[in-house]
Image (cartoon, rainbow, N blue to C red):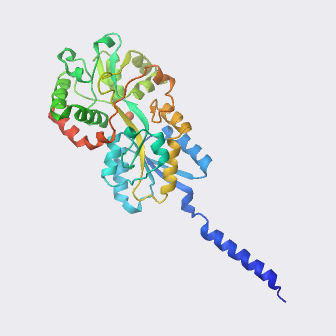
Amino acid sequence: MSNPSKSRTLLSTLCGLLITLLTAPALADGEVNIYSARKEDLIKPLLDDFSKQTGITVNLVTGKEAELLQRLQSEGINSPADLLLTSDAGRLAAAHHAGVLQTTPSKLLEKNIPAAYRDPEGYWYGLSVRARPILYAKDRVKPAELSTYEDLAASRWKGKICMRSSDSIYNQSLVAGMIVHHGEAKTETWAKGLVANFARSPKGGDRDQIKAIAAGECDLTLANTYYLGGMISSSDKTEQEAAAQVGVFWPDAKTTGVHVNVSGAGVTAHAKNRDNAVRLLEFLAGDQAQHWYASVNNEYPVNPAIPPSATLKAWGEFKADTLNVAKLGELNADAVKLMDRAGWK
Ligand code: FE
């Protein structure tokens, strides 16, 4: 004999179980997939923290900037990536224009990241700030002789400047910033003057320019400060010694400010784990992550509430250009053409 009250209890238990199963998060909700052009050691410990705090599994694929963008484009709707992490507003803007990102408005991101360091439409957000000041040979140049980027085109610097090539997105972004402030014609005249002052044909990365100053090949260069910071704390003695001979000068203090850029990230157009990707972005812009994320690569926190590392503090405060870095991406093609016309190899 069946007991009707027992059957009802069993039925309601089964119904409850079914409801639980139907409303339980799907497995995919428990992960987020990142394509990162930043090296694993610049991000992995932070991602582990995020996983610990949220229970969300983070899958990380690292690669070169251009490769990852191409991969996102060719994978299209089938891409497993939820978040693209890369450096330079020029590259973030290129990803946006290639259609591989989606807009993800977030009150928290808007609160923690100043407007100048994120895409106005929310396609990508800066997560760390890098500055590109003038670096000089301490034994041959007095800071009082330096003033602005514009002044680097003056004839007294003939044969004194080492420079990375115009292929470098960092220099392209810097020139894009000059176009915003001075217009194309003036910027082109400036670029021609700058090129005329080169001590050698452009070659190597930012660290190589610093080493060339130390070797006496030239007296001045433009470089992102985290390269100098990395050399100061390098285990390689020759890098340490080269860095010790080079000083940081913050140009354009009375005018437009120091050229700054960001590393950042945007949620991909076809993200299957969009909410988790936004949550990760919010985590990366938060207090704890900002401190670690910026200091591990000697960058400046994007969140102004977080102080920079001791290495960066030692170079003093500076006035940063207030231009929205998205503009640098918009003008990238114009900058590249201009550098070409100016003979910047
Ligand atoms: Fe870099």
Q: In front here: 56 or 39?
A: 56
Q: Find residue 336 and report its image quarter.
A: top left
Quadrant of ligand 1: it is: top left
Picture coordinates of residue 259 (x, y %)?
A: 33, 30
In the shown orientation, is residue 69 left or right of residue 285?
A: left
Q: Please tell me which residue is depicted at 52% across the width and 54% down the height of the picture.
A: 276
Number of marks in the rendered image:
0
Q: Is residue 141 visible?
A: no
Q: Quadrant of the N terminus?
A: bottom right
Is 257 placed above or below 111 here? above
Picture coordinates of residue 127 (x, y %)?
A: 45, 40
Picture coordinates of residue 345 (x, y %)?
A: 20, 32
Q: Residue furthest right?
A: 1
In the shown orientation, is residue 45 left or right of residue 122?
A: right
Q: Please tell me which residue is depicted at 45% across the width and 31% down the height of the picture.
A: 300
Picture coordinates of residue 169 (x, y %)?
A: 30, 37
Q: Find residue 118 and report its image quarter.
A: top left
Q: Is residue 174 visible?
A: yes
Q: Please tell me which residue is depicted at 33% across the width and 52% down the height of the picture.
A: 70
Q: Please tell me which residue is depicted at 39% across the width and 62% down the height of the picture.
A: 77
Q: Residue furthest bottom?
A: 1
Is 210 placed above or below 28 here? above
Q: In front here: 73 or 321?
A: 321
In the shown orientation, is residue 98 left or right of residue 280?
A: left
Q: Find residue 138 and report its image quarter.
A: top left
